[in-house]
Image: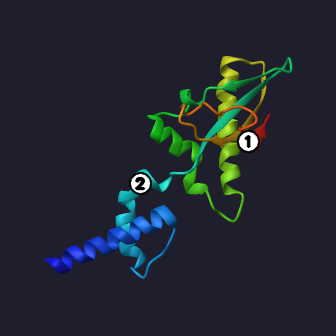
């Protein structure tokens, strides 16, 4: 019984080390990965807040932020997973950018059904520091950093 418990703790400890610090131990990856899936609440933890932001550009030259929550179903956690497109991240080619471009094109088609004056969609990734005052407290310049992803017409 002690051997089983020791093995379990070793595998779980290995997964925790990998989750928090990306340190690989000599424990076989297939065993660590099994336990790693239990570490989901800690896998995406960072020191910053991030969000995908879509801007609609209109015929009169104005722009407006498009509420993506209408187009991405599920609760906050599921929406975040979908916004990140994690399954397409860390690839050598432009796969993630192509997937964001596909998303922007679909978004443009749906927005045009509501407002035919929309001319383009731009997707940006916004990053800002965490704050004890709430998620959006520092979501403004000079704290906000915007990174261009794609634009479709």
> Which residue ends up furthest to the left in the rendered image?
1
User: Where does residue 23 sit, x and y in percent of width and height?
Assistant: 50, 72
Q: Residue at x 86, y 21 (%)?
A: 61
Q: Which residue is mark 2?
A: 40
Out of 130 and 52, give the one closest to the viewer: 130
Q: Is residue 32 above or below residue 91?
A: below
Viewer-side label of 1, 2: 1
Q: Is residue 98 above or below residue 114?
A: below
Query: Which label was assigned to residue 110?
Result: none
- Tell whether 131 sits left or right of 57: left
What is the spatial separation of the Cα atoms under label 1 and label 2, in whole angstroms?
27 Å
Query: Which label was assigned to residue 145?
Result: 1
Give the structural element (helix, strand or loop) at label 1. Answer: strand
Q: Residue at x 47, y 62 (%)?
A: 20
Q: Mark 1 or mark 2: name the one nearer the start of the chain.
A: 2
Q: In which quadrant of the rendered view does residue 126 lie?
A: top right
Q: Is residue 129 above or below residue 24?
A: above
Q: Residue at x 13, y 77 (%)?
A: 1
- Tell whether 17 sits left or right of 64: left
Q: In which quadrant of the rendered view does residue 25 lie?
A: bottom left
């Amino acid at each position: 019984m002690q051997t089983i418990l020791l093995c379990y703790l070793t595998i779980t400890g290995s997964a925790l080390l990998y989750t928090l610090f990306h340190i690989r131990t000599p424990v076989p990856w297939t065993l660590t990965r099994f336990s790693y899936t239990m570490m989901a609440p800690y896998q995406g933890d960072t020191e910053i807040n991030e969000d995908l932001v879509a801007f609609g550009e209109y015929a009169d030259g104005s722009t407006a932020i498009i509420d993506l929550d209408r187009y991405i179903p599920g609760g906050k956690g599921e929406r975040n997973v979908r916004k990140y497109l994690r399954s397409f991240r860390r690839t050598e080619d432009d796969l993630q950018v192509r997937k964001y471009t596909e998303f922007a094109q679909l978004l443009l088609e749906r927005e045009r059904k509501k407002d035919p004056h929309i001319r383009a969609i731009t997707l940006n990734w916004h990053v800002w520091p965490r704050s004890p005052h709430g998620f959006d407290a520092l979501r403004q310049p000079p704290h906000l950093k915007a990174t261009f992803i794609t634009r479709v017409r």
